[in-house]
Amino acid sequence: MDGIISYIRRKLSVRVSLWVVMFAALIFITALGFLFYQSREAIRQEAINRATQILDKTSLRVEGIMNRVEVASKMTEWLVQRHPDKADSMFVYSRAMLLNNPDFYNCSIAFEPDFFKDRGRYFSAYSRRDTPKNNKMGETIRTSLGGSDSFQYFYMDWYLMAKLFKHACWTEPYVDVDMSTNTGEMVSSYCYPIMDNEGKVICVINTSLSLNWLSQTISAVKPYPNSYSIMIGRGGTYFVHPDSTKITRETIFTKTLLEPDTALTALGHAMQRGEEGMKQMIIDGQDCYVFYKPLADTGWSMGIVCPESDIFGGFDRVRHAVMGIVVVGLLLMLYIFIKVITRELSPLRRLADEAETIASGNFETQLPDIQRTDEIGQLSQSFAGMQKSLVKYIDELKNTTAQKTSIERDLHIASAIQRGMLPKNFPTKDDRDDVQIYASLTPAKDVGGDLFDFYIRDEKLFFCIGDVSGKGIPASLVMAVTRSIFRTVSAREAMPDRIVSNMNEIIADANDTNMFVTLFVGVLDLPTGRMRYCNAGHDAPLLAGAGLGSLTCDANIPIGVMQDWKYSLQETQIFTGTTIFLFTDGLTEAENANHDLFRMERVKEVASQALAHQQHEPKQLIDMMTNAVHQFVDKAEQSDDLTMMAIQYTKLERDVRFSKRIVLLNDIQEVSKLTAFVDEVCEVVGFSPAMTMQMNLALEEAVVNVMNYAYPEGTHGDVTIEAKTNDVRLKFTIIDSGTPFDPTAMEDVDIHQDAEDRPIGGLGIHLVREIMDSVNYERVDNLNVLTLRKKLRKNN
């Protein structure tokens, strides 16, 4: 079977021939089906008409005989009423009934008991037709006096029915017994009552028809060889049936008692109701048509059963012969078509072989010269032209492929450069005890336009996240420029609004392509948890800590749009354990195959699950978010760059082991007090003399710097120095209420530069930075707060 299917798939001539033959077969089947249907309906209608006509004819014949019985009974009534007192005349009348009507079986004129007192109690003039079986001399009519003590006729059904109803009626079949021969005949009688002037029944005329004669008359009706007739009485009893054992012994409903047959039951009820019609049903395992009709007013009904095999036998034989001829013709047509089409397509086969040779790489192969003007000839010419074009295309493709390879290599290098610009080392709890950071960037193409960056300077975390309009190489170039500008500007500026404003001025000034960048810049003061931030049209970050919520952000425009836009500064307090989750719109606008978006609701749902499972550390949170996006998007192609960054503030408040405070006037003469203060503190924490000297040097430089710059000349003020130590570090806090002055904003001094070339100033804060582990400045409540920290080590 598989070999045949494979052969058909490989041979075009076979497939075309099959399609033609199947189409022709469809037409033939449709046409023949319609013809067969119409023919079958015509035969069916002819069978109905034929059976109906025969049924009507037979019914008329039987009804004609029954009408003769009724007419003869009425004539006899006239004679009886004319001479009611002449008993002997009654024998003449009953005998005349049979002589004048050869179809009658017997006739009796039965009078009421003691009607003829001189004749005794019983008087019934009875005449019966003898058959040659009972009379060797041939058929004759015997007349006798019916009635005796052993046969009291006035109690018989035929007599009582006529007497009680006082009108003529037909009886159900019964056996008429000849007492002289002790033989009987199955008959049905027509009982006709005769009444006197007072309306009293004086006698009943009983005229019988032989059921055998009736059965022979009806059974002779055979429209088809295997058809047969039936007749039932009022109760459904069979009077006529091909199986003589059922006559008078079974009804039409007998069979349904053992095997329920709704169709047969419906037929019986219809015939009992005196209906006329036709039913299609199954009788003895055969599909049959049953035609039925009532017999006059007797309450009887006759029917003809015609098997479908008789009605449609000839039609089925013709149909089978025609279908056989059609099948043979279609097979012959298929064979001829395959041969003809195969011969016509042979040049196409040669052309296909040569085309395969060309496809294998041998482009110089000579195609066959097909001298034809039809479609195959045109196809050959087209192949020749295609061969020439293919050779040219291959050469061009080699050059294009080489160029594409070079471009892909350049893109790969550009992608590596772009990734190299982003931070790779993320602080963990093993690195710092105040902050953890993790970030990921997945470009939609080889290079993308998303960016993130962070670094720590003077105990402040500077961070940003941004999204350049567009994708691909142009966006990646703007991304690289933006990230570089952020590093340059934030190195000398600590306020996020000024960082964003400076970046906006630089980018907008040279933005000939009208590209823009949504940007969020934040500066988190690590010692205090105080965060200042500025948002330039970017999605607001989420804060996940004790609860989940979005950071409130002002509606600023992206950078690069308007050069003179005034960006606002916002501030919030970040508590220990809080995670700042930043992302680009590639997260909320991630699409699945149905173009449904991930949306902010799902982002918050995943973040809530992370909080519930205590998995809101930066890497845990981003891993959960990445998995959620991948499950949502499934196999859909990534449509936008996706960048996420999580910052968790983990600063812990440690117990203070030692605390000391001193307040100095802004006078250089007060520095000696500072030295004694620092010596005492260093002695408590156990610093070595060398380290104590360095601490004095750093504190003196920082305090003198405040005295010189915080308070203008001639202005008096205080400088407060607080010293606190815990198990980890020593912290000095210098507080003054003078002019706002951030010594950490000064650029680092190039100590390798010649003294003559180095600008004045900045050396003192450089020295402080070299000695202390961290230097942090904050302006809090109109106070300058400078914090110096030094970790406690064993070798201190």
Image (cartoon, rainbow, N blue to C red):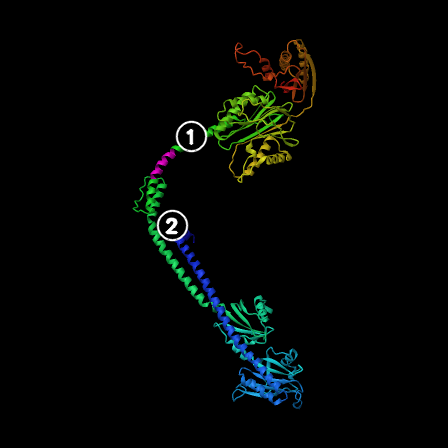
Please, what secondary structure does the residue beneath circle 2 have?
helix
Q: Position of residue 548 (x, y in %)?
A: 64, 32
State the image coordinates of residue 795 (x, y, percent, origin top left): 62, 19
Q: Which residues are magenta?
A: 387-398
Identify residue for label 1: 406
Helix, strand or loop at disc 1?
helix
Q: Is residue 545 magenta?
A: no
The residue sitting at 39% across, 51% down in the picture is: 16
Query: Can residue 181 be seen in this snapshot?
Result: no
Relative to 539, residue 361 above or below: below
What's the distance in space between the residues labelled 1 and 2, CA to CA?
45 Å
Q: Mark 1 belongs to which amino acid?
A: Ser
Residue assigned mark 2: 12
Amino acid type shown at disc 2: Leu
Q: On the image, which quarter does residue 730 sit in? A: top right
Q: Nearer the viewer, residue 447 or 170?
A: 170
Q: Is residue 315 left or right of residue 242?
A: left
> Quick check: 450 left or right of 20?
right
388 inside magenta stretch: yes
Q: Which mark is residue 566?
A: none
Judged left or right of residue 60, residue 773 is: right
Quarter containing the C terminus: top right
All told, the count of numbered labels is 2
